[in-house]
Image (spheres, grey):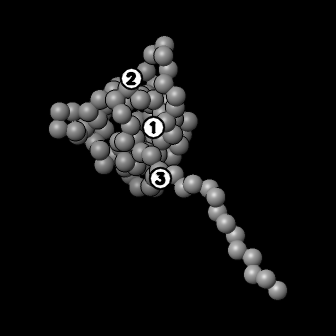
Amino acid sequence: MAERKATVNAKIEPMQTLDRLAEGQVARIVAIHGDDPLAMRLMEMGLLDDERVRMLGFAPLGDPLEIEIRGYRLSLRIREAQRVEVEPLPSDPAA
């Protein structure tokens, strides 16, 4: 009997996190990683699944970064933003 081998054609995409967005880029939050107090605090600040975020910019030395979510501005440390998995969205010409 011949041996069958499965072939995987799916390309594995690396996880994109909030800290990797470019200035002005818009994304949708997919997940907050972890179940510790930091993850809970991020969710309390409004970083919830399916929320849209826009990267506003970075401090001169790169940390912290500033995002817009739910109509307000929020500054996060890079290590905090690395816990937020996002899916980049097409740019909005009206924004």
- Locate residue 62 relative to residue 23 in the image: left or right: left
**Residue 72 numbered tag:** 2
Q: Is the Cβ of the residue at disc 2 closer than 8 Å to that at disc 1?
A: no
Spatial separation of the CA atoms under disc 1 and disc 3: 21 Å
Which label sits in the foreground, 2 or 3? 3
Name above or below for residue 20 compared with residue 15.
above
**Residue at (34%, 29%) from the top-left corner?**
23
**Residue at (41%, 29%) from the top-left corner?**
25
Spatial separation of the CA atoms under disc 2 and disc 1: 12 Å
Q: Which class describes the residues within 10 Å of circle 1: few (<14), some (14-19), or many (20+)? A: many
Q: Position of residue 56 (x, y in %)?
A: 33, 27
Would residue 48 be seen by someone viewing this image from the given angle? no
Q: Element at badge 3?
A: loop
Locate the C terminus by quadrant: top left
Spatial separation of the CA atoms under disc 2 and disc 3: 29 Å
Please name whichever residue, 94 or 50, is drawn nearer the observer in this view of the structure.
94
Q: Which class describes the residues within 10 Å of circle 3: few (<14), some (14-19), or many (20+)? A: few
Q: Position of residue 36 (x, y in %)?
A: 41, 55
The residue beneath circle 3 is 14
**Residue at (23%, 40%) from the top-left corner?**
63
**Residue 47 numbered tag:** 1
The amino acid pointed to by label 3 is Pro
